């Protein structure tokens, strides 16, 4: 079978190498489809005989326009990072949600306060995942309209970007889902916090572990566990988790 990742930019992605590590010697293939629009990506998906896609920024929300079925998590998030096609029917899933759950379990307890920065596909998945563990979740976003709409729909709190410092001070865990560095984050107090950061390529907050005695969880963990779930959905075969973990930890 043939699989791919769509998004822009994605030339740096580890997904093809992870797939090869997960299934050494497999006849399945995994490619990168970097396109300038989601429409072009979907056209190639159908015309070039792919069986499934992983979806990354900036297409996780727009991709839903081209799906026929959505799993319950996708329905709540209105965002998907995985498509499967079967007999012409395109089904949408979200494995970011499971990637976050696996990354934070063991670090948070019910009633802990979690603050999520960002309300894109990754941020919404992180917020819903944290709430599923029983935590009290607040999502902070630059666009109040988007944060309010999502928060109201799924039953979590939201706040403005101006409140971020106070929210971080009062939380047990801070999840940064923003893919680019934000200057405002360099000046926060992360003393004793648990931090999960989506950006594994150029992390902004890893300094907090030494400076503030924070517990830092790399985005590599998120990447690993969402990939495990993705590859299982693609192939119906358990991937080689330990080989995948070894590869990610040594890049």
Image: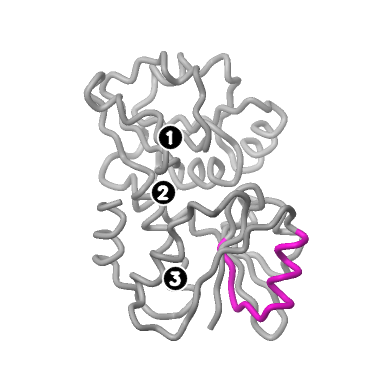
Single out the mark in the foreground, 3 or 2. 3
Label 2 packing within 10 angstroms: few (<14), some (14-19), many (20+): many
Q: Give residue 86's position: percent from left, percent from top.
A: 64, 82
Q: Which residue is mark 1?
A: 175
Q: Give residue 115's position: percent from left, percent from top.
A: 46, 29
| Span shown in magenta | 39-54
Could you tell me if the residues under marks 1 and 2 are in contact, i.e. CB atoms within 8 Å? yes
Left or right: 108, with 52 as reference point: left
The front one of 28 and 227 is: 28
Q: Which residue is mark 3?
A: 231
Q: What is the C-alpha distance between the residues marked 1 and 3?
A: 25 Å
Q: Give residue 143's position: percent from left, percent from top.
A: 68, 28
Label 3 packing within 10 angstroms: few (<14), some (14-19), many (20+): many
Q: Going 62% across and 77% down the picture, which residue do you hit? A: 50
Q: Which residue is mark 2?
A: 100
For residue 191, above or below residue 121: above
């Amino acid at each position: 079978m043939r699989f791919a990742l769509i998004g822009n930019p994605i030339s740096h992605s580890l997904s093809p190498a992870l797939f090869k590590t997960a299934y050494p010697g497999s006849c399945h293939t995994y490619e990168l489809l970097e396109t300038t629009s989601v429409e072009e990506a979907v056209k190639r998906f159908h015309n070039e005989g792919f069986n499934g896609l992983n979806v990354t920024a900036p297409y996780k929300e727009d991709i839903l326009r081209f799906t026929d079925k959505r799993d319950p998590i996708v329905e709540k998030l209105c965002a998907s990072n995985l498509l499967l096609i079967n007999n012409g029917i395109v089904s949408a899933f979200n494995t970011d949600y499971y990637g976050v759950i696996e990354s934070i379990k063991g670090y948070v307890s019910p009633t802990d306060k979690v603050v999520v920065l960002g309300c894109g596909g990754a941020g919404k998945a992180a917020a819903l995942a944290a709430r599923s563990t029983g935590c009290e979740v607040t999502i902070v976003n630059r666009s109040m309209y988007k944060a309010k709409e999502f928060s109201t729909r799924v039953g979590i709190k939201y706040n403005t970007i101006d409140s971020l410092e106070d929210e971080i001070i009062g939380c047990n865990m801070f999840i940064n889902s923003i893919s680019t560095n934000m200057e405002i984050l360099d000046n926060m107090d992360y003393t004793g916090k648990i931090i999960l950061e989506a950006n594994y390529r150029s992390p902004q907050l890893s300094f907090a572990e030494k400076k503030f005695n924070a517990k830092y969880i790399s985005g590599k963990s998120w990447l690993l566990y969402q990939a495990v779930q993705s590859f299982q959905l693609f192939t119906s075969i358990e991937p080689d988790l330990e080989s995948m973990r070894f590869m990610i930890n040594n890049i």
